[in-house]
């Protein structure tokens, strides 16, 4: 893909497991355009999070290249912001101090970062909770703090590893709509890992389905649903046709993984 924001070429990843080598990813070719919201789905253990960790710079590929904005990824960098499934907030810091942590530690003057912190707290619906501590917040509110903490750094690429996976269904839907509204404002490049088919189709421009281990890109689908989107789009015929196709792809890989697991020695 010309002028890609994120590009993986021939990427493979192996891990040592006891007395053998486990191939987690093999020959991944994958690109994300600038300002694209790309989601990745796949059966458990297919290497989705491993792929994201290599784009983040937390891990290195065993083979191939990972590039962001044309530069090889060698280590973590503030230009690539990561939101995990658990917000991992500093419990001794208030909401304000958690969100402003990044620019403060980088020596950004308060006069510069204060308006950004206020703006992002407002966008994620936390105005009025600035002086609360994480123990006083619900799970959804903690994740809002985590998202604001990353966004205030204004990363070029936003990496999200099942950020709503631990939330209940109602809170998860609220967070999906929140993320949609924030992305509509900023149009950052996003790589979003999820197990939830409806979530991926609701928020993303493209959905890539991975094979069972060793993970490859089985199929990439463009989500031709108009933006801005709301949860009502999930009842449309186009949405449900996409959902049926993705579900069939994932079911095929899950059955293959189960079959091979049963056939393999313990």
Image (cartoon, rainbow, N blue to C red):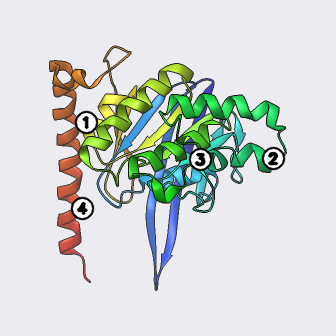
- Give the residue pinned by disc 3: 131
Dot 1: what SS?
Answer: helix
Please give the name of the residue rendered at 31% of the width and 59% of the height, measured from the top-left corner: 44
Please give the name of the residue rendered at 53% of the width and 34% of the height, measured from the top-left corner: 127
181 is higher (above) or lower (below) than 27? above
Q: Nearer the viewer, mark 2 or mark 3?
A: 3
- Give the residue pinned by disc 2: 106
Q: CA distance from mark 1 to mark 3?
A: 35 Å
Q: Do tag 4 and tag 1 residues touch (Cβ < 8 Å)?
A: no
Please give the name of the residue rendered at 54% of the width and 50% of the height, measured from the top-left corner: 132
Mark toward the start of the polypeptide (4 vs 1): 1
Q: Quadrant of residue 187?
A: top right
- Give the residue pinned by disc 1: 198
Q: Is residue 80 left or right of residue 193?
A: right
The front one of 103 and 136 is 136
Q: Quadrant of residue 39?
A: top left
């Amino acid at each position: 893909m010309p002028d890609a924001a994120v590009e993986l070429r021939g990427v493979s990843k192996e891990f040592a497991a006891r007395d053998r080598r486990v191939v987690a990813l093999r020959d991944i070719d994958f690109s994300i355009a600038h300002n694209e919201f790309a989601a990745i789905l796949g059966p458990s253990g297919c290497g989705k999070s491993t792929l994201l960790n290599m784009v983040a710079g937390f891990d290195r590929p065993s083979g191939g290249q990972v590039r962001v904005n044309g530069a090889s990824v060698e280590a973590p960098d503030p230009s690539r912001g990561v939101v995990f499934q658990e917000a991992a907030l500093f419990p001794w810091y208030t909401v304000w101090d958690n969100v402003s942590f990044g620019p403060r530690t980088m020596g950004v003057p308060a006069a510069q970062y204060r308006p950004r912190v206020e703006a992002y707290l407002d966008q994620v619906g936390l105005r009025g909770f600035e002086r609360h501590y994480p123990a006083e917040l619900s799970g959804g509110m903690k994740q809002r703090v985590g998202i604001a903490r990353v966004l205030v750094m204004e990363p070029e690429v936003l990496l999200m590893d099942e950020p709503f996976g631990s939330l209940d269904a109602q809170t998860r839907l609220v967070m999906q709509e929140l993320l949609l509204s924030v992305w509509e404002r900023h149009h950052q490049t996003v790589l979003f890992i999820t197990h939830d088919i409806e979530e991926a189709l609701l928020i993303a421009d493209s959905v890539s389905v991975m094979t069972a281990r060793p993970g490859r890109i089985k199929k990439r689908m463009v989500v031709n649903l108009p933006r801005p989107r709301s949860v009502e789009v999930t009842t449309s015929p186009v949405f449900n046709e996409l959902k049926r196709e993705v579900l069939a792809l994932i079911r095929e890989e899950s059955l293959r993984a189960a079959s091979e697991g049963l056939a393999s020695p313990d």
